[in-house]
């Protein structure tokens, strides 16, 4: 008898790692440094919180069902923002609002795939992508990263079969942090279009890309929406993680199919979350630019400070957006080291094995460092603790 779909996949690494620290008493002189999750820990700016409060108190519609694909003012505003960011012409009917970016991915897969179909995903992978494919009955086909933790185009082409429905790219990447060059993204788009499959580009962290201007030119191409499905998150941009507001851009035909999925799962995205996202788009672009600079400064702190670890045999494999990805020098597997780091160094970070197929030995050598909530001082402390660690 087949297993229930939830038993076909693994436990979320975030959930699993929280168990490692549950009940642990950390010394006052060595408090826990949590670099396991890429989520802002602070509240949104006061103005956005005020907009949420005003909507909750004064807008009756904030408490009612809304359109399945999101409220028209937010869809129009996001279409304008995407158009400006990518120097393109994206229409509101090509944009949908979802209950977080994870749901945008799930809706895209539901619209593309049938039982036993295949989706090519880069490895190291974003674990929730793999988990959803497992639970959807879709085969995740690993595309292992090559030089610079970038996906290899020829390797991807070799993996395409008659059951392939999409290739997934995540840029800036989670978990590796690397920013995919525009030419590489274009080449993957060309491959997907030539083979009649979709290119799903998860750009959750696009607001923290170090490059100025459009990171790629896909939205400028005629008929982009017949191949590209673009995913986005308001959570990282405006600290709205708890309100679950994400987005998807695709063709109206694909949006029609995704609407069936969304209507069945959540009926509509959060009204209050949408109010916050709209206010953020209209009022927080200057503030967001400052947030981006802070993240870029933390990225620089990672790169500037890494020689402390390099001297101990660590290697920096990738860095950008909210993440650094590193290789450790020890004989023990990364998951065992991760648990010991909690007890012996008061550090919580995720082992590479949580981003890899179980039979991939590279995962035992690697770690993801999420630096969304550690400043330069915290990064220095982290590196000092890791440099002193000797299992």
Image (cartoon, rainbow, N blue to C red):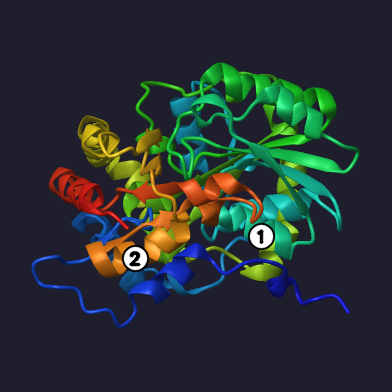
Q: Nearer the viewer, residue 31 or 328?
A: 328
Residue that numbered label 2 is attached to: 340
Check the picture and name the quadrant holding the N terminus: bottom right
**Looking at the picture, does residue 169 appear above or below residue 343?**
above
Tell me where residue 229 appears, x and y as whole percent.
Answer: 65, 39
Looking at the image, residue 370 sits to the left or right of residue 62; the answer is: left
- Which residue is tagged 1? 132
Q: Is residue 155 above or below residue 389?
A: above
Q: Residues within 10 Å of mark 1 (few under 14, many from 20)?
A: many
| Quarter of the view holding residue 199 | top right
Asked whether the viewer can see residue 380, the reply is yes
Instruction: State which mark lies toward you, 2 or 1.
Output: 2
Residue at the extreme bottom of the image, as rendered:
23
Q: Residue 6, percent across and down?
A: 69, 73
Depth check: give the residue in front, 40 or 255. Answer: 40
CB under 8 Å between discs 2 and 1 = no
Q: Is residue 192 visible?
A: no
Residue 360 location, x and y as percent?
Answer: 63, 48
Mark 2 secondary-structure assignment: helix
- What's the residue at 86%, 58% (across, down)? 115
Q: Nearer the viewer, residue 52 or 61?
A: 52
Q: Is residue 203 left or right of residue 303?
A: right
Q: Quadrant of residue 390?
A: bottom left
How many labels, in total? 2
Image quadrant occupied by the C terminus = bottom left
């Amino acid at each position: 008898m087949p297993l229930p779909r939830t038993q076909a996949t693994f436990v979320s690494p975030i959930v699993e790692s929280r168990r490692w620290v549950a009940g642990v008493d950390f010394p006052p002189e060595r408090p826990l440094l949590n670099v396991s999750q890429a989520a802002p820990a602070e509240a949104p700016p006061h103005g956005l919180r005020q907009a949420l409060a005003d909507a909750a108190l004064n807008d009756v519609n904030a408490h009612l069902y809304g359109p399945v694909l999101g409220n028209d003012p937010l869809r129009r505003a996001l279409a304008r923002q995407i158009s400006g960011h990518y120097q393109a012409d994206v229409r509101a009917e090509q944009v949908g609002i979802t209950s977080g970016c994870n749901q945008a991915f799930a809706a895209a897969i539901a619209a593309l795939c049938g039982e036993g179909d295949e989706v090519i995903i880069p490895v190291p992978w974003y674990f929730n992508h793999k988990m959803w494919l497992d639970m959807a009955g879709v085969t995740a086909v690993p595309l292992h990263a090559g030089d610079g933790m970038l996906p290899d185009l020829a390797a991807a082409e070799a993996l395409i079969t008659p059951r392939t429905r999409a290739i997934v790219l995540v840029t800036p990447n989670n978990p590796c942090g690397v920013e995919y060059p525009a030419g590489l993204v274009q080449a993957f788009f060309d491959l997907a279009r030539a083979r009649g499959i979709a290119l799903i580009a998860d750009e959750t962290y696009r607001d923290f890309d170090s490059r100025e201007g459009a990171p790629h030119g896909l939205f400028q191409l005629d008929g982009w929406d017949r191949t590209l499905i673009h995913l986005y998150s308001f959570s990282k941009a405006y600290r709205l993680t708890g309100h679950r507001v994400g987005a998807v851009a695709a063709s109206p035909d694909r949006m029609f199919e995704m609407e069936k999925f969304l209507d069945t799962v959540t009926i509509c995205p959060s009204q209050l979350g949408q109010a916050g996202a709209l206010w953020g788009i209209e009022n927080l672009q200057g503030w967001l630019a400052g947030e981006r600079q802070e993240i870029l400064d933390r990225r620089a702190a990672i790169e500037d400070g890494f020689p402390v670890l390099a001297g101990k045999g660590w290697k920096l494999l990738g860095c950008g957006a909210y993440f650094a990805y590193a290789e450790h020098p020890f004989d023990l597997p990364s998951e065992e080291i991760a648990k010991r780091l909690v007890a012996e160094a008061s550090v919580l970070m995720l082992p590479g094995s949580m981003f890899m197929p179980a039979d991939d030995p590279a995962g035992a050598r690697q770690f993801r460092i999420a630096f969304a909530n550690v400043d330069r001082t915290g990064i220095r402390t982290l590196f000092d603790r890791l440099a002193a660690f000797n299992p």
